[in-house]
Amino acid sequence: MSRPGAAASWLRMQLRAAAIVALVLEVPLLGRLARLLTATPQLERDESVAGVPTTIARPSRGGPWPTLIFLNGVTARGRAHPSVVRLAETLARLGFVVLVPDLPGLARGELTEATLAATIDVVVASLERSEVRGRRAGLVGVSIGVSLGLAAAEQPGLAERVTVVAGIAPYVDFASVVRLATTGFTLERGQPVRYTPPPFMGLVVARSLIAGLPASEARRRLLDELLLVPDDDPDPLALLRRLGEEQLAPDTAAVVALCANRSLEQFDRLYAALPGSLRAGVERLSPLAGAAALLAPVELATAPHDTYLPLSEMRALASKAANTHVRLTLTSALDHAVPSFSLASLGGLVRFDGWVVRVLQAAARR
């Protein structure tokens, strides 16, 4: 039999989860009721945390509060994305202080070691703020943001201060993402499996790998040209295939050759030809490599068939995270990183609600 206190705590979290679903998904009537029953939070839209522009949402009174650091995926609007703003405000209405940094590169679709370093710096600086209860925080995000949160939570001195790492549809092995984006194949138990993500993934991979090269005129020119490619271009890497015949510096040529490649049989050879420093950076950006250092519970959610990543990508983390529990929730209420409300997917919405409850419970735990 469960203790009365535990049941009361679960009910409080369930009510909070219902409010989050109602407000973030803008469910008619329920969202309006949730606003009427909660106090308007304080919102600082332009603070600097470790030198990173950050939005901070705080409850209207009290403090210190349980804390969540929300990490975006790739979106041009960054922390100003309406769904992100609604989520931060909603969590603050429910008693959490929420920090939403604009991590360098993500708005442009560039994931580099500088992005991870800034993530770690923001987490360290956030934990020292007086409004943060117990100098501990949960790391929550979507897509690449969750991956950065996982990598940050593996750092010495941070692992024991993270209450939970949670989010929707992260990658865990960046090299696997490069293979998937360029060849359309993933590996499951060492065997190739066809999995075709949207072309935009290839554009993010190309921008990220080229941004990871040492500064040079060729690097700047390539990045500038890739930034002009529309996010919805059906063949965003055609530009790099045209560059294959140009004279490029060896390191730049290696990245271009890998990104232009479509052959699974050629992938390993081309990947091995990348500069050693770039391959080392890819590994540091891969939470799978350091998963044994994770101590906080990990709550991941994804669609049964995510448009970008296969389930094996997320399941691989559980096998390596020997010192914590990784739980994966499959729900039809998600389409990659975007939750949706539909009467036709009530079962999926119930599973999504359960995931939210568990995340809130872990984040609020003293």
Image (cartoon, grey):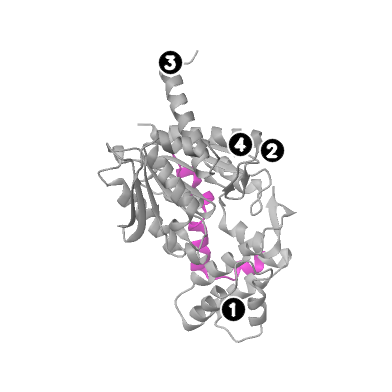
Which mark is on residue 4?
A: 3
| Residue 35 placement (x, y as % from top left) | 43, 38
Residue 322 seen by the camera = no
User: How far is the residue under mark 3 from the one under mark 4?
Assistant: 27 Å
Relative to 336, 99 lies left or right = left
Which mark is on residue 344?
A: 2
| Residue 107 placement (x, y as % from top left) | 48, 64
Question: Mark 1 — residue?
Answer: 253
User: How far is the residue under mark 4 from the one under mark 2?
Assistant: 10 Å
Magenta part of the chain: 268-296
Q: Amino acid at mark 2?
A: Ala
Task: Name the N-terminal-most of marks 3 and 1.
Answer: 3
User: How far is the residue under mark 1 from the one under mark 2?
Assistant: 49 Å
Relative to 354, 215 lies left or right = left
Residue lying farthest top?
1
SS at mark 3?
A: helix
Q: Amino acid at mark 4?
A: Leu
User: How far is the residue under mark 3 from the one under mark 2?
Assistant: 35 Å
